[in-house]
Amino acid sequence: MPDSAATATATATATAAPASVIGLGMMGTALAAAFLTAGHPSTVWNRSAARTGPLVAQGAQPAATSTARPVAEGHGADGFSRLVELLKS
C-alpha cells in the first residue's frame, strides 16, 4: 500500500502553481524557501547569482540572466495576485 503522505506531497507538487522570486535578500530568500517547502515549482533570480545557490540546492530553478527572469518565462503579469493567494494558503 502506498504511503499516503508521500502520495499527497507528490499530488500537491504536481498541481502547485509555479512561483517566481526576483531579488534574494532576506525577504526574497525566505519567500522562495517557503514556496519550495510548500511544493511550488520555483524560479529565482538575483543580481548576484551566488545568492541563488542555496535555493537551487533546495530545488529552485535559477533564471540564467536578468532578461530571463521568471516573468519573461511565462509566469505572467498576474504574478502579484498569485503571490497573495499563495501566501493566504
Image (cartoon, rainbow, N blue to C red):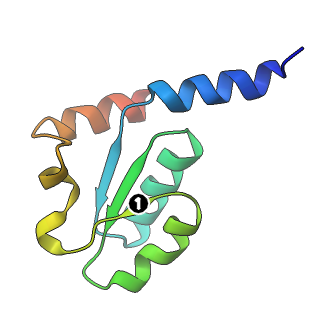
Front residue (pair 4, 78): 4
Query: Which residue is depicted at the point 39% across and 32% down?
Result: 86
Residue 84 in the image, given as x and y percentages of width and height: 30, 34
Residue 18 in the image, given as x and y percentages of width and height: 35, 39
Query: Which residue is depicted at the point 26% across and 72% down?
Result: 64
Q: Is residue 68 above or below residue 74?
A: below
Residue 83 in the image, given as x and y percentages of width and height: 30, 38
Q: Quadrant of residue 6?
A: top right
Query: Which residue is depicted at the point 40% across and 60% down?
Result: 61
Front residue (pair 77, 31): 77
Q: Is residue 35 above or below residue 4?
A: below
The amino acid type, in three-letter code, at marker 1 is Gln
Q: In the picture, which quadrant includes the N terminus?
A: top right
Q: Quadrant of residue 21?
A: bottom left
**Seen in the image, is 80 located left or right of residue 12?**
left
Where is mark 1, residue-wise? Answer: 61
**Seen in the image, is 63 located left or right of residue 74?**
right
Residue placed furthest toward the right: 1
**Seen in the image, is 9 located left or right of residue 5?**
left
Residue 34 in the image, given as x and y percentages of width and height: 52, 49
